[in-house]
Image (tube, grey):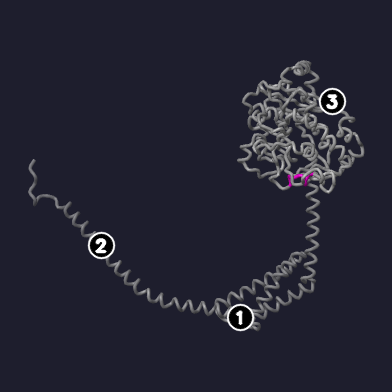
């Protein structure tokens, strides 16, 4: 088809484009005019701002100057208001101390009136007049006289506050002693769940003859006297705690079949302890459980501690006295700290006479790493390997022993570094050579009147093993999880053994939550009796 001639075509599209260009031109022109007008107005307004600024500064300066002169002038009303306001603030505190809240409220109200007058004077730059200040000054003077008439003077207030401070100090001391005693009672009591577990295991012992037969067979195992194996000693009356010690040790051992545990408990807990280790498998390790009554050689004629326990007067003294040991563990000279189980650590060569080297573990520890390298630590002829604790000032000898006694001061250095029981390696050959048990007996006999140290096994241990201690790397034994809430996480992670020394044991409700899971992780919750007794 042919295109139409130009005169017959539609002109609409061309007209639309022309209108668009026209509108764009109008908008550009209007924008340019607005920019020019705005710039012109801004240039005109700048000189006026510059002119006003010095005036404002001058007014402000004069206002500050007038107020300062008023406050410094002894005859000005602003000075009177300021002095009365300062005195009124002191009487507000005193009246509140005496329980006069109405007077305190009235004084506060007049202080606000003073502040309002001073603020208005500062804004206006004018002195406060007599008519403005008279009502406030008069009312404040009346209130201050009323406060003085109520004996709210400085000397009375000092005496009152001093008596209050003394009373609060006495109450704080009583509360600390009471909290320590309650904490001690809680730490020494047996939780309901542990009692339940012991009862159920005892029932199992007497109702299942196979358990007794297995225990008798275990007594004759040659592994118990094999010095090529790794032997551990644990002395405890706590079934669950001992189970955690054994379970954590074998769980982290490279070769658990080479571990042998020698457990000694008392007559009451022996059935439960023996039943638990027969009914549970600990990765092929050997566990021997014995009762302390089996050691016929351990009698009052041989052991000073047995003689001391049987002495009624001494027992009454120990049970009634009170003290606090390092780390905040309240001992109060209770039976636990003179119990024979606690002192069995000094008779290890007699308990396992055929062994050459053993590792002693307390029942409040949890093992995190393989302990078999501990048997290879060179003791350099010493008897015991232990972690020293003298990084803290209170772990030196003078904190444990009575150096005012001539026998102590002549034998020991008060600045000698202390160390800890809980994870210790013993060379039993060197022990017998140095006759450490005899040294222990000597010091127990010398302390019959409680004049060398007060209580516990650590002071007599420091004396018996004096000069026979080989320091171990600190990472073998990290203490304080039973009282110190701020132990470095990196130190805990690197530790081979964590020791819950202190009163907040992990099996108690008052245990430190931050550390409790590390111990509870080695409890056998799948066991029927544990589920029934402890999963409440």
- Start and end of the magenta stretch? 394-400
Mark toward the viewer: 2 or 1:
1
Q: SS at mark 1?
A: helix
Residue 28 — which label?
2
Q: Residues within 10 Å of mark 1 (few under 14, many from 20)?
A: many
Q: State the predominant SS element of the stretch in magenta.
A: helix
Nearest the viewer among 377 and 39 is 377
Residue 189 — which label?
none
Nearest the viewer among 41 and 284 is 284
Residue found at x 48% / y 76%: 57
Find out whether residue 399 is within the magenta segment.
yes
Q: Where residue 457 sits in the image (x, y, percent)?
A: 79, 37
Q: How crowded is mark 2: few (under 14 residues within 10 Å), some or many (20 or more)?
A: few
Sequence-wise, the earlier of marks 3 and 2 is 2
Residue 532's place in the image compared with 499, above or below, is above
Residue found at x 79% / y 39%: 463
Mark toward the viewer: 3 or 1:
3
Q: SS at mark 3?
A: helix
Sequence-wise, the earlier of marks 2 and 1 is 2
Q: Where residue 366 sits in the image (x, y, percent)?
A: 68, 33
Q: Quadrant of residue 485?
A: top right
| Circles 3 and 2 in contact, beta carbons < 8 Å | no
Q: SS at mark 2?
A: helix
From mark 3 to mark 1, how far is it between C-alphas?
93 Å
Residue underneath mark 1: 70
From mark 2 to mark 1, how far is it between C-alphas?
62 Å
Q: Residues within 10 Å of mark 3 (few under 14, many from 20)?
A: few
Sequence-wise, the earlier of marks 3 and 1 is 1
Count of numbered circles on the image: 3
Find out whether residue 356 is within the magenta segment.
no
Q: Is residue 305 left or right of residue 373?
A: right
Residue underneath mark 3: 293
């Amino acid at each position: 088809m042919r295109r139409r001639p130009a005169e017959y075509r539609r002109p609409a599209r061309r007209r639309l484009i022309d209108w668009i260009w026209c509108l764009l031109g109008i908008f550009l022109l209007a924008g340019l005019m607005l920019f020019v007008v705005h710039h012109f107005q801004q240039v005109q307004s700048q000189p006026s701002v510059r002119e006003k600024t010095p005036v404002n500064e001058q007014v402000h300066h004069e206002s500050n100057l007038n107020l300062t002169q008023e406050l410094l002038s002894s005859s000005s009303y602003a000075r009177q208001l300021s002095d009365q306001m300062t005195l009124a603030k002191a009487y507000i505190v005193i009246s509140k101390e005496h329980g006069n809240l109405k007077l305190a409220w009235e004084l506060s109200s007049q202080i606000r009136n003073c502040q309002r007058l001073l603020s208005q004077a500062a804004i206006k730059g004018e002195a406060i007049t007599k008519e403005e200040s008279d009502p406030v000054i008069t009312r404040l003077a009346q209130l201050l006289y009323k406060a003085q008439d109520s004996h709210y003077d400085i000397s009375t207030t000092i005496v009152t506050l001093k008596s209050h401070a003394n009373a609060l100090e006495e109450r704080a001391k009583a509360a600390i002693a009471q909290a320590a005693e309650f904490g001690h009672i809680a730490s020494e009591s047996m939780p309901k769940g542990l009692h339940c577990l012991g009862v159920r295991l005892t029932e199992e012992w007497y109702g299942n003859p196979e358990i007794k037969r297995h225990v008798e067979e275990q007594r004759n195992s040659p592994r118990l006297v094999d010095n090529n194996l790794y032997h551990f000693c644990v002395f405890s009356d706590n079934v669950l705690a001992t189970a955690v010690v054994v379970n954590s040790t074998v769980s982290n051992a490279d070769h658990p079949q080479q571990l042998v545990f020698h457990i000694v408990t008392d007559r009451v807990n022996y059935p439960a302890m023996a039943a638990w280790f027969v009914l549970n498998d600990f990765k092929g390790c050997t566990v021997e459980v014995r009762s302390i009554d089996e050691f016929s050689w351990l009698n009052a004629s041989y052991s000073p501690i047995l003689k001391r326990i049987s002495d009624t007067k001494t027992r009454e003294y120990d049970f009634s006295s009170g003290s606090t040991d390092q780390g905040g563990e309240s001992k109060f000279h209770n039976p636990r700290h003179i119990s024979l189980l606690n002192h069995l650590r000094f008779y290890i060569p007699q308990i396992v006479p055929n062994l050459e080297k053993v590792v002693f573990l307390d029942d409040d520890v949890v093992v995190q790493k393989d302990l078999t390298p501990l048997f290879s630590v060179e003791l350099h002829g010493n008897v015991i390997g232990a972690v020293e604790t003298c990084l803290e000032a209170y772990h030196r000898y003078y904190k444990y022993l009575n150096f005012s006694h001539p026998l102590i001061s002549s034998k020991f250095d008060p600045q000698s570094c202390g160390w800890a029981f809980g994870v210790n390696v013993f060379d039993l050959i060197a022990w017998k050579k140095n006759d450490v048990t005899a040294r222990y007996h000597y010091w127990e006999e010398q302390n019959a009147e409680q004049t060398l140290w007060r209580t516990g096994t650590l002071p007599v241990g420091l004396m018996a093993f004096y000069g026979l201690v080989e320091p171990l790397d600190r990472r073998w034994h990290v203490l304080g999880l039973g009282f110190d809430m701020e132990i470095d996480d990196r130190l805990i992670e690197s530790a081979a053994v964590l020791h819950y020394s202190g009163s907040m044991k992990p099996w108690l409700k008052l245990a430190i939550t931050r550390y409790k899971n590390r111990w509870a992780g080695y409890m056998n919750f799948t066991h029927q009796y544990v589920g029934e007794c402890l999963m409440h």
